[in-house]
Amino acid sequence: MAELSFHTSIPFMGAPMDLSLITSAISGAQTAVELVKTAVSARDQAKAEEAVADTKKNLAIAYDSLLSVSQEAMKLVQQVMTEKEVSQTLREEVKRLTAEIEDRKRYVLTNIGGGVLAYAFKPTDGEADVAHYLCQPCMTKGHKSVLQPHGPRSNFKCHACNAVYLADQASYQIAARARGRGF
Ligand SMILES: [Zn+2]
């Protein structure tokens, strides 16, 4: 019963289970059983039959209450499980967003030549990733797409949104030297 009374305190379920129903039904059945014992020891057939009928009635009420409480308990268990799943999903989402924010800090919006803007990788000490650019519109949509060399000149293409970036070769090299990262 300790487990049931724990679930009754859950606030999001609204009205708590009415355990007093089952308690009073059981107590009624116990009283009726006592009456049967008394009637039997007094050898009073009529009283004994009446008490047995009363016991049966009380047991039926107790059984109904028990059934209803069991069903409510099942509903509560299912609800608690759903709440746990939601909570787990939210925890994972927070973890994912935190990682995304941390990753976002590794990039800086840069003119990669000819006024073309892209997110340049900003390596920190010990960072193993090679220098690269990310597509700005894709990044805004939360998608990391590394720009790939495109065409005979040092132009770039985003293979996610198919945007082509015509970055001027000379400006591109100046920008790379200024960053000192060997772009
Ligand atoms: Zn893109």
Image: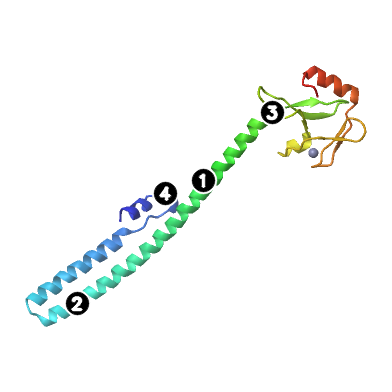
For the residues labelled 3 and 1, the Cα–Cα distance comes to: 35 Å
Residue 120, percent across and down?
76, 27
State ligand 1's quadrant: top right
Question: Is there CB contact under 8 Å for labels 2 and 3?
Answer: no
Query: Where 23 falls versus 132 (above or below)?
Result: below
Location of mark 3 (residue): 128
| Amino acid residing under circle 4 | Pro
Which numbered disc flags the more N-terminal residue, 4 or 1?
Answer: 4
Which numbered disc flags the more N-terminal residue, 3 or 1?
Answer: 1
Which numbered disc flags the more N-terminal residue, 2 or 4?
Answer: 4
Which numbered disc flags the more N-terminal residue, 2 or 3?
Answer: 2
Which of the labelled discs sits on residue 52, or is there none? Answer: 2
Crowding at mark 2 (Cα within 10 Å: few <14, some 14-19, many 20+): some
Residue lying at 47% horizontally and 55% vertically, measured from the top left:
79
Residue 33, percent across and down?
17, 71
Colour setting? rainbow
Crowding at mark 3 (Cα within 10 Å: few <14, some 14-19, many 20+): few
Secondary structure under badge 2?
Answer: helix
Which of the labelled discs sits on residue 87, or is there none? Answer: 1
| Amino acid residing under circle 3 | Ala
| Quarter of the image with the C terminus in it | top right
